[in-house]
Image (spheres, grey):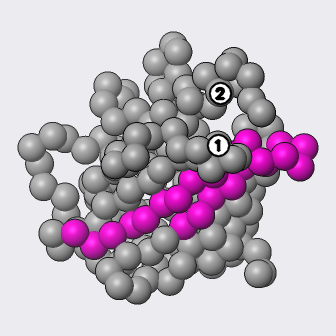
Amino acid sequence: MFTKETLWMLMCIFSFCMYGQSNFENTLKYEEGSESPKASLNDISWIQGYWKGEAFGGIVEETWTPPSGGSMMCVFKHTVNGTVTFYEIVTIAEENESLIIRLKHFNSDLKGWEEKDETVDFRLVKVTPNRVYFDGFTFEKVSDKEINMYVVIKEKEGSSEVKFNYHKQKL
């Protein structure tokens, strides 16, 4: 079980900042009142697969399904010293001729961080051939076997941009 301090730290690290974001190098901010650009899952299908990297003192793993039914689904796991610290379930869905990310966080015992009917959402901002920018969340294709994800996280002292470097694994 986690101590209160550990849970607070994890909540701070993974409370994604949707506003008040400074100009970071690899992420963009969605401007309220604007429209997300037209896009489809074909624009981001290159993220499908099993990806593994290191972050926050441990191992991070993500498995993305191929596009089907108007969405892609991901499960995320963070482990430190062989112990799961938390999970995420993530979807990227086609909505209003654009894309949106929705995610939920879970402790190692699958107790949710967000309320039952709440998700953390990221609206699409921009699409380029090797990058897909959501509000404070960017996917970058480095090669067929390497991707980066950049996420703006809220911290006690403000916001920062964190890079996750992943390498494709075989299942």
Residue 90 inside the magenta-drawn segment: yes
Q: Quadrant of the N terminus?
A: top right
Dots 1, 2 in contact, CB < 8 A: yes
Q: Amino acid at mark 1?
A: Asn
Query: In the rendered image, which residue does mark 2 sit on?
Result: 7
Query: Which x, y percent locates residue 135?
Result: 33, 46
Q: Nearer the viewer, residue 129 or 60?
A: 60
Whether residue 117 sits left or right of residue 11 in the image: it is left
Task: Calculate the distance from the C-alpha at mark 1 to the C-alpha at mark 2.
Answer: 9 Å
Q: Secondary structure at mark 1?
A: strand
Query: Quick check: can you spot residue 25?
Result: no
**Residue located 40% across and 40% down the image:** 115
Q: Position of residue 129 (x, y in %)?
A: 40, 72
Q: Which residues are magenta?
A: 74-95
Q: Which residue has dot 1 on it?
A: 107
Instruction: Provide residue 24's location: percent of width, then percent of height.
Output: 43, 35
Earlier residue among tags 1 and 2: 2
Please rate how many residues cluster around mark 1, counting C-alpha atoms within 10 Å: few if below 14, some from 14 to 19, many from 20: some
- Name the residue at 61% across, 22% down: 8
